[in-house]
Amino acid sequence: MKIIAAPDKFKGSLTSLQACNAINAGILQVHKNAAIHLFPMADGGDGFAAVLKHYLHTETIGCKTVDPLQRELDTSYEWDAIHKTAIIELALASGLMLLKGAERNPLKTSTYGTGLLIKAAIENGAAKIILGLGGSATNDAGMGILAALGFRFIDESDETLFPSGENLQRVKNIIPPSVKPSVQFIIACDVQNVLYGEAGAAVVYAPQKGADESAVKLLDEGAANFAGIVQSLTRKDIAGFAGSGAAGGVAAGLSAYFNTEIMSGAAMISTIAGIEKQLVTADLIITGEGKMDGQTNEGKVVDYIASLGSKYNVPVIACCGIADITQREIKRIGLLSVIALADEHTSTETSISNAAELLTNAAARVATGFNAGT
């Protein structure tokens, strides 16, 4: 039996590599001679840089920057010296995980810290930036990143604005640096949302970043204003392409002034890892993530892996910590089944603290119940 293990992280408990190891242990309990191929996965969010490091063997470069509220922060990016490419995970400097609950406010937060990481990578010789979007605490349309790269945002009084969500609506002019960095951006993300409107960054995602109803309205109107200013200055429409609203509009802002390509983070990692070569002769795929819900089929890892299973006619079973998903959604994604790590008698705290053991047990149940060719 040949089994592919390709899970995302189980947020708050297991990295995707740890999840792979737990699945591997469970399968071997049942099928000691199984051919198991482990592929830790990620989309553009938390863990993206670490997963690419696993496959590309990049060098980790420590870097001083600031968090979404401008507090000093030590973090890192990944560096591929041969290809002059830096891998930067936005969540490490501008992520929601860096803030306490009461600090979450996308009117005040900024991607400036991520911009400082990008600036450091460019100064290190980077010609290409692979930027993973996801898990952001921000909704500034990438103003913070651009500000760190030398762009100035001007209000009606000809004053320079701080690059935050609340100031999007006040932008009246954008002044690029005298020498714009020569760098290409490859943006990895897992959402298709546009910059503003009912399917926009603020309406869909700002509430989980701490925005109330009035803040959502200000952010959405601000994003529309920002896009209008950009169009008047550059003749570029940055608001309507799929993914322009990712991470509060970072892809939109960067596309205004840089050579930018946007793609699925899961697809990027799958290609680099070479998963499809192994699927040709695989009997089963086991994937998973911490929580499966209505957003799972919006380009996330489980959804992408399920699409590969369908392409190669390989059944896909997902394991997850929490299964807040209907049978109709499971079928639409293309999964054979979903296995929750724990039952209704197991607390969330217990599930998180014992995630590796529970995932191993779940994988063993999957292997026991599955026979090749059935």
Image (cartoon, rainbow, N blue to C red):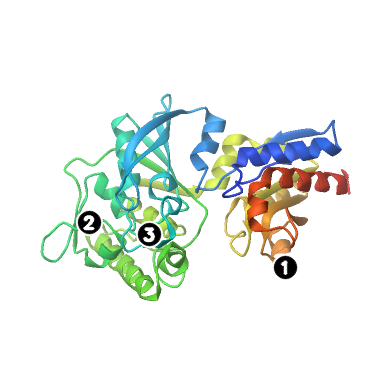
Crowd rating for badge 3 (residues with CA inside 10 Å; few <14, some 14–19, many 20+): some
In this view, the mark in front (2 or 1):
2
Badge count: 3
Q: Position of residue 261 (x, y in %)?
A: 43, 47
Q: Position of residue 369 (x, y in %)?
A: 87, 49
Q: Is residue 207 left or right of residue 215?
A: right
Q: Which residue is mark 3?
A: 103
- Type of amino acid at the residue the image marks with label 2: Phe
Q: Nearer the viewer, residue 54 or 18?
A: 18
Q: Position of residue 310 (x, y in %)?
A: 72, 52
Q: Is residue 82 above or below residue 158?
A: above
Q: Is residue 12 above or below residue 65?
A: below
- The image's mark for residue 162 is 2
- The image's mark for residue 97 is none
Q: Quadrant of the N terminus?
A: top right
Q: CA distance from mark 3 to mark 2?
A: 18 Å
Q: CA distance from mark 3 to mark 1?
A: 37 Å
Whichever of callouts 3 and 2 sits on the residue coming sooner in the sequence is 3
Q: Is residue 365 above or below residue 139?
A: above
Q: Secondary structure at mark 1?
A: helix
Q: In the current view of this chain or complex, which residue is farthest to the top? A: 82
Q: Residue at x 40, y 36 (%)?
A: 76
- Marks 2 & 1, CB-CB < 8 Å contact: no
Q: Residue at x 54, y 48 (%)?
A: 43
- Marks 3 & 2, CB-CB < 8 Å contact: no
- Type of amino acid at the residue the image marks with label 1: Arg
Q: Nearer the viewer, residue 349 or 58?
A: 349
Residue 93 in view: yes
